[in-house]
């Protein structure tokens, strides 16, 4: 075989291998398709978090804003595409003022959870009105709560909690307890390191 023939053969093999590789959807491509298909739900995407397992996307958490409402959505890996697993729906006014940085993935019990917090308009001081959300991607459990803060003896405290209706289910009790502890740590520390402590201690 001549040198020219060898070069042509190698070029053909490279093109064929490239074409075959391009047919395998990348995680980013799958995510883009999923978000495009759910554009009516997600609206403007403000933050995307992925937690991987063996280099493959297992779950994707998305913070989006649509029609002046915030939503948190969680997608799961369904093989060749991402499927919507859970949506918070339109979050209440307690989530009106927010930072995308407050959407996070925590793993306090070797169980990945999506957490998010925000506050009501003009009530973002530690004694104001705050919204808190937790979703377990393992047990598909979601808990939402609105809190109103106050001050006692110079300390910031939680005066009241209003949980989402389904949060009264007994199977959600451990998650309510975990969320309550996080709220206490966060309020007592007035943000910062207190909010970063999501280990149930």
Image (cartoon, rainbow, N blue to C red):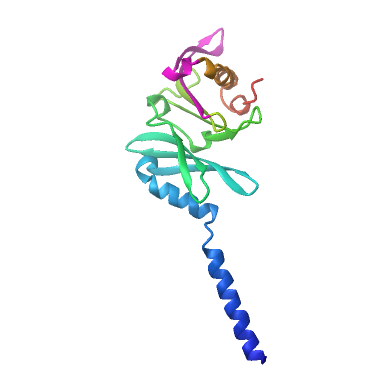
- At x 60%, y 75%, the residue is 14
- At x 55%, y 35%, the residue is 104
Q: Is residue 42 left or right of residue 11?
A: left
Query: Quadrant where the N terminus lies?
Result: bottom right
Residue 16: x and y in percent read: 56, 73
Tally the marks: 0
Residue 62: x and y in percent read: 47, 40
Q: Is residue 90 left or right of residue 131?
A: left
Magenta stretch: helix, strand or loop mostly: strand
Q: Quadrant location of residue 39?
A: top left
Residue 121 is covered by the magenta coloring: no
Foreground residue among 28 and 45: 28
Foreground residue among 112 and 149: 112
Q: Which stretch appears magenta?
A: 140-169
Query: Quadrant where the C terminus lies?
Result: top right
- In the image, residue 83 sits, relative to residue 2, either above or below, namely above
- In the image, residue 102 sits, relative to residue 15, either above or below, namely above
- In the image, residue 45 sits, relative to residue 161, either above or below, namely below
Residue 141: x and y in percent read: 51, 26
- At x 57%, y 79%, the residue is 12
Q: Is residue 13 left or right of residue 125?
A: right
- At x 54%, y 59%, the residue is 24
- In the image, residue 45 sits, relative to residue 195, either above or below, namely below
Instruction: Mark yes or no: residue 157 visible.
Output: yes
Foreground residue among 126 and 62: 62
Residue 150 is covered by the magenta coloring: yes
Q: Quadrant location of residue 188?
A: top right
Residue that protrudes farthest toward the bottom in the picture: 2
Instruction: Mark yes or no: residue 148 visible.
Output: no
Residue 18: x and y in percent read: 56, 69
């Amino acid at each position: 075989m001549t040198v020219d023939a060898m070069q042509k053969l190698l070029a053909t093999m490279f093109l064929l291998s490239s074409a075959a590789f391009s047919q395998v959807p990348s995680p980013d491509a799958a995510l883009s398709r999923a978000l495009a298909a759910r554009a009516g739900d997600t609206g403007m995407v403000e933050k995307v978090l992925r937690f991987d397992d063996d280099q493959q996307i297992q779950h994707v958490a998305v913070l989006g804003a649509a029609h002046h409402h915030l939503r948190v959505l969680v997608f799961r890996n369904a093989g060749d595409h991402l499927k919507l697993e859970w949506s918070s729906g339109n979050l209440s006014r307690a989530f009106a003022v927010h930072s995308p940085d407050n959407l996070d993935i925590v793993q306090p019990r070797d169980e990945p959870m999506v957490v998010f917090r925000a506050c009501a308009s003009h009530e973002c001081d530690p004694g104001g009105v705050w919204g808190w959300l937790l979703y377990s991607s393992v047990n598909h459990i979601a808990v939402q709560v609105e809190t109103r803060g106050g001050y006692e003896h110079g300390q910031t405290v939680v005066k009241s909690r209003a949980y989402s209706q389904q949060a009264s289910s007994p199977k959600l009790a451990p998650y309510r307890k975990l969320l309550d502890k996080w709220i206490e740590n966060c309020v007592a520390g007035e943000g910062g390191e207190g909010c970063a402590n999501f280990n149930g201690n």
